[in-house]
Image: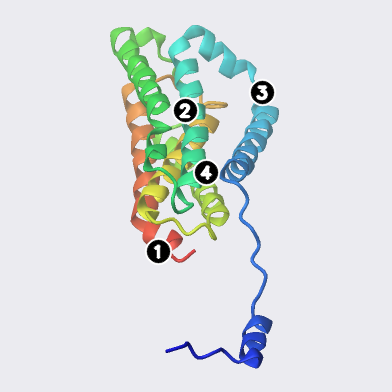
């Protein structure tokens, strides 16, 4: 039995209601846009506070420099991985992209904490209270996370929670990196715990809201 032909007027009516679909930007380009916003923010902070104090801290404690550099790489890699995994059909192995730099970040931070315990005189004092660190990291990570969610709003990730964890890691690492520009406290145990708590808050909040914020896009 032959199929019933579709009337031409119906085809034309359906075609008239179609709207053009704007093509998504490549993942690397969306990640680059997010990184550019972070870089501009860093440039503004450097203009306000100067790079001298930060470089002096790095010269006195190279582990601080390694920790900051690893945090920057983690932010870039996590943002790139989030943008890639937001597109259906991409390999899940992208989730491991920020892991090596994150391990270096944690190791360097832990070494700085150990150095502070072994040699208390090497810890720089007189900085802001630890609660200010939490407020800064969370406060900066919120708009950075919102920007990433806006960039991924049409990508429709198949695993929104996984993508949200990555963008939370990217935002937290970027905020922690920005904090080092003017943060005078060395990696003392209390300072390190405050940073870890703030990072966990950011990642946890993004993971908890991942389905609601990303699954509809």
Front of the two marks 1 and 3 = 1
Secondary element at image label 3: loop
Q: Earlier in the sequence, mark 2 or mark 4?
A: 2
Q: Is residue 188 left or right of residue 75?
A: left
Q: Nearer the viewer, mark 4 or mark 1?
A: 1
Disc 4: which residue: 140
Label 4–label 3 contact, CB within 8 A:
no
Q: Residues within 10 Å of mark 3 (few under 14, many from 20)?
A: some
Judge the density around disc 1: few (<14), some (14-19), many (≥20) Cα neighbours within 10 Å.
few
Label drawn at residue 50? 3
Circles 3 and 2, Cβ within 8 Å, touching? The answer is no
What residue would you read off at disc 1? 212
Quadrant that contains the N terminus: bottom left
> Who's the residue at 57% across and 18% down the image?
54
Between disc 4 and disc 1, whose residue precedes? Answer: 4
Q: Nearer the viewer, mark 4 or mark 3?
A: 4
**In 3D space, how far apart are the residues under numbered discs 3 and 2 (Cα atoms)?**
20 Å
Residue 56 locus on image (x, y percent): 56, 11
Q: Which numbered disc flags the more N-terminal residue, 3 or 2?
A: 3
**Depicted 39 relative to depicted 217: above or below:** above
Mark toward the start of the polypeptide (1 vs 2): 2
In percent of width and height, residue 40 lies at 67, 37
Instruction: Locate residue 4, reporting x and y percent.
Output: 50, 91
Q: Quadrant of residue 47?
A: top right
**CB-based contact (under 8 Å), mark 1 and mark 2:** no
């Amino acid at each position: 039995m032959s199929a019933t032909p579709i009337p031409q007027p119906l085809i034309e009516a359906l075609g008239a209601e179609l709207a053009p679909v704007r093509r998504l930007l490549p993942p690397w380009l969306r990640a680059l846009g997010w990184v550019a916003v972070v870089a501009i923010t860093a440039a503004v902070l450097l203009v306000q506070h100067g790079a001298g104090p930060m470089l002096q801290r790095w010269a006195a404690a190279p582990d601080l420099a390694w920790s900051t550099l690893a945090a920057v790489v983690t932010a870039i890699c996590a943002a790139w991985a989030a943008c890639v995994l937001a597109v259906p059909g991409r390999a899940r192995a992208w989730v491991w992209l920020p892991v090596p730099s994150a391990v270096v970040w944690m190791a360097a931070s832990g070494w700085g904490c150990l150095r502070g315990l072994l040699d208390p005189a090497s810890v720089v004092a007189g900085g802001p209270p630890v609660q200010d660190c939490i407020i800064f990291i969370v406060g900066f990570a919120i708009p950075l996370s919102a920007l990433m969610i806006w960039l991924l709003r049409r990508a429709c990730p198949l695993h929104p929670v996984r993508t949200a964890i990555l963008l939370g890691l990217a935002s937290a690492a970027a905020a922690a990196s920005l904090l080092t520009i003017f943060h005078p406290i060395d990696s003392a145990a209390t300072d390190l715990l405050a940073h870890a708590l703030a990072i966990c808050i950011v990642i946890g909040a993004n993971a908890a809201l991942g389905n609601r914020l990303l699954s509809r896009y």
